[in-house]
Structures are given as C-alpha cells and as structure tokens.
Amino acid sequence: MFEHFSDTVVLSRMQFALTSIFHMLWPILTTGMGIYLVIVEGLWLKTRNPDYYYHARFWAKIYLLNFGIGVATGLPMEFQFGTNWAPFSESVGDFFGSILGFEASMAFMLEAGFLGIMLFGWTRVPPVMHYIATIMVALGANLSTVWILVANSWMQTPNGGDFVDGKFIVQDYFQAILNPAALVSVSHMFLATLETSLFVIGGISAWYILSKRHSAFFATSLKIVLAATIAVAPLQIYVGHLSGEQVYENQPSKLAAIEARWETIPAGEPAPWSMMAWPNGKAETNEWEMNVPGGLGYILALKPTLPTPILGLKEWVPSDRPPLLGLIFYSFRIMAGIGVFLAALMALSVLQWLRGKLSDEAISQQRWLLRSWMFAAPLGYIAVETGWTVREVGRQPWIVYGQIRTAEAASNLPPGDVLASLSIFTGVYTLLLISALFFGSRILREGPNLSLPIPGVTVDPDGDSTPAEFVPDQRPVEAQQ
C-alpha cells in the first residue's frame, strides 16, 4: 500500500478523486434546489399565499451555503488539469478546454450574476424581476451540469475528430459535443441532482414535522416534493436503463467490470445478471456469485437475450481491464438499489396521500413514513457518488476511453509535492465540511423566519394584509434580513 505514496500517477488520481468527490456534494443540491425555488416562488406569485414566499426565503439560505462551498471547491478541481494533468490538457485542450470555458462563462457567471438579486433583492426589485433572477440562477446551475457532463461524456465516448500525433483535432465540433454518451449522461445527472434535492428537502421537512415545529408549513414542502418525485423517481430508473444500454454499446470493458463477467456471453444466449459476487482478478474468476437467469438481458434490452455478444473481461489483457472490480461491481448495485428504494418510498407516500394520511392534522402521526424520508435524505448523495465511481473507475485504464491512458496523461511531478498538496486539500476540505455542517445545522435550528415583510403587501394594525403597490426598499441589505 505505502508504495503508492511514491507514485505520482496514483497520488494525482487520489487527489482528483478527493477533490471531485467532495466538490460534487454541493452542486448536487444547488442544481436541484434551484428548480425547487423556481417552483415555490412561482406558486407565490400565482397564489400570493405567504407560505410559498417564506419557503423561498428559507430554502434559499441552504442554497447559498451550498453555492459558496461549491465555488470554493470547484475551482481547485479544474486547476488540476493544468497542474497534475498537463499532458492530457495539451492533448485535448482545443476541445476540452473550450467546454470548461463555456461552463465558467455561460453557466457559472449566469448563476453568480443573478444570485445577489435572488438573495437580497426581494424588497429592492419588482417581484417579476426577482422571479426572473431566480430562474436565471437555476438555469445557470443546471447549464453548469450540462457542460461538465458534455466534457466528461466526451472522455467516455470520444467523437467529432481524430487524434493526430497524440493531439485531438476537432473535425465536427457539434458531433464532439453530442457524442454518443452525452444526452443520456446529461439526463441521468440532471435527474440525479433533482431527485437528491427533492429527498433532502423532503427529509428536512419530515424532521421538522416529527419535531412538531412548523408542522403545517413543512407539510406543504413535503407535498410539493412528493408531487415532483412522482415524475422524477420512475423517470430516473428509466434513464438509468438507457445509460446501461449506452455502456453496453460503447464501453464493453466497463460493462464487463460492472457485471464481474469473465467469460463472453454469445449473441442469442440468455444473459444472467450477477446480483452478488466476489471477483478475484488474479484467478480471473468469481469466488462465488448469485445469478438471476436472463436478468442482464432484461436490464439492457427488456428481454432475456441480446443481439450482440456481451464481452467478458478475458477478452482484454490484464493491463487493459478496469481495476478494483469489487468497487465497481458493488458501487453500481448500491446506486441502483438506492434508486429503487427512493421510487418505492415515493409510491408508498403517494398511497398514504391518497388515503388522506398526509393532511395537516394527520401527517404528524405517520411517524414511520416521516422517518423513512429522513433516512432517505442522504441516500441520493451516496447514489451519485457511487454512480460516478462506476463511471470513472470503470473507464480505466483510459482517461480518454480507448485513446489516452491515464498513466500517460499525468504531469511529471515529484511525488512528495503531490502528496503535500493532497494532504493540504484533505485538511482544508475537512474544515469546510465541519463549517458546512455547523452553519447548516444553525439554519435548521433557527427555522423559517415567518415575520419577514412580504413585497407588495401591507399589514394594518389589526393584522390583516392587503395588496399594495411595490416600492423598493432603500435600507441597507443587513436591515432587511
């Protein structure tokens, strides 16, 4: 194990894995929660129900916390393409660099440019203008996901040009952007961030209801979340099926690793699915396994047999096979299992809703259901992280699948320097995580501020509210919070 600490490539991979895994925790929530904020603010503008206004104000605080840490951790991750992966950047920079530039200029700047209006402009700009700002923030956050997934999908299924003397020459820019993995990858990640955000909001709402704090208020957010998951949870499972088809067609070695499949299954023969297994790379076999006959065929093509062979790992020499087979195998099953669990929880919740068990008066009695939502709150994060583990580790030993090996793409740096930066990142990210948990818990302890003034509404001495003409608040921002 300790010999890896003298290997620059291994250390650079460890550092990128640490920074990307940690960074991903934060934009997962901002991309999905941005859409939720658009929904609740739109409901407020349509109904003028103050509950929706206060929901927008409360959840925006959590959005801001995630946005800040996401920015702080995202920039160092991208800088590594120049510091730790310079040969890779030199080889593919004409395309890859421009895509990352689009993400920064088109997506991040859009989100950051309107964020101040969304957070602090409630009483300073007209409500419609504020709503446009919220839409722009959500659009920017999700455009960021699009461009990052386009770049990563191109690494999975390079297209749109040729490698000439080790350098990628773009022939068709749009073909490179719309590479075979792009559309399904963007869709899968978009739904993953939205589903994760919905279950986080739902889990927090369930905690408040169980704690008997603002029960009616958070029953509203739980029902909004539940209504959205009716579409999102089943659709995510279907898009996951499409993602499996894409891997089957374009990355056969990754599929073999996901299934711990050593022997090739000929076309037309039933393809079993390994529900559980323990792969042994040295012996090139599974020490034990539990198979579902025809299961893999149904997963990939909705029938027990497939029109083309499923290649086994023995079709590749050991140096061309993905490493860490056990990690890939079980990461995929954790991801898929969580997806099924979240869909099942949605279905049970809808059933209780139809039975009238989620009314403001009865919802606090559904303790088992509320605890299930609390349990589900972090599961989306685990599913996303394990899914990316399958995606990235399964692509190895290639950084650009079939074209550039990871070992050839790393900068020639002294191992001690990389180990030092890895140690610094570990310490800084630990402090950031502690800070995020501290400030996040403080936001939750304080709860929603239901005494904030509502734009365009005046309150008379008897407590009745009436619409009024919007007048911008000229006080300092601090005085308005």
Image: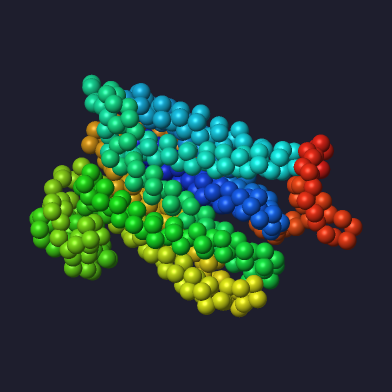
Q: Position of residue 458 (x, y in %)?
A: 82, 51
Q: Residue furthest right?
A: 461
Residue 410's place in the image compared with 247, above or below, is above
Q: Residue at x 27, y 24 (%)?
A: 171
Which residue is rendered at x = 53% and y = 72% of the image?
353
In percent of width and height, residue 15 lies at: 44, 40
Asked whether, in this view, residue 416 is left or right of residue 39, the answer is left
Q: How is the image coloured?
A: rainbow
Q: Residue 474, can we see it?
A: yes
Quadrant of the image occupied by residue 91: top left
Position of residue 402 relative to residue 433, above or below, is above
- Along the horizontal axis of the image, is 308 left or right of 1? left
Q: Nearer the viewer, residue 461 or 292?
A: 461
Q: Is residue 379 visible?
A: no
Q: Is residue 280 left or right of residue 412?
A: left
Q: Position of residue 291 (x, y in %)?
A: 21, 67
Residue at point 43%, 52% (across, down): 191
**Total numbered circles:** 0
Residue 292 appears at what percent x and percent y? 22, 68
> Which residue is pictured at 39% across the width and 56% down the height?
236
Q: Nearer the viewer, residue 353 or 189?
A: 353
